[in-house]
Image (cartoon, rainbow, N blue to C red):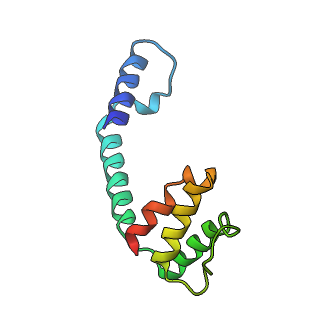
Amino acid sequence: MRLVSGLLNADQTNRAGNLAPLAWQGHEDALALKLNQLWLSMISASRLAPAKVGLRNSFQHMWGYVSGHSKLSPQTQDLASLASDIQTLAVKHQVSYLMNSTAPGELRAWL
């Protein structure tokens, strides 16, 4: 709601004489409703389980960054073991791409 609040405050400032689009004026309730609908849609979409083939592809991609240190084959290992190996090796070898990504941890919720 901070975004909506910020937009509403910006709109009030606009009425006071600052330059800004007039399209915002008088549409605060409609904007808030549309943003709430968008947020609910995003929350619903984030709760849908990804397809196993998509998870495997994602973990195989991440595995490529630690493949030189891994004893696992992404083709034969179960995804939970592969995910664990990726996270462990990323931290051990300071693989910044994986350490700065939320994917290795968040995708494990679907395993």
Q: Quadrant of residue 50?
A: bottom left
Q: In this orientation, which residue lies closer to the viewer: 34 or 27?
A: 34
On the image, the x and y values in percent for residue 19 come to 52, 18
Q: In this orientation, which residue lies closer to the viewer: 23 or 82?
A: 82
On the image, the x and y values in percent for residue 100 come to 55, 49
Residue at x 52% of width, y 62% of height: 88
- Is residue 10 visible to us here? yes
Residue at x 57% of width, y 70% of height: 58
On the image, the x and y values in percent for residue 9 come to 35, 23
The N terminus - image quarter: top left
Q: In this orientation, which residue lies closer to the viewer: 89 or 27?
A: 89
The C terminus - image quarter: bottom left
Left or right: residue 101 compared with residue 7: right
- Placement of 48 over or under 76, stated as above or below: above
Residue at x 33% of width, y 33% of height: 2
On the image, the x and y values in percent for residue 57 come to 59, 76
- Is residue 25 visible to us here? no
Q: Quadrant of residue 14?
A: top left
Residue lying at the far top of the rendered structure: 17
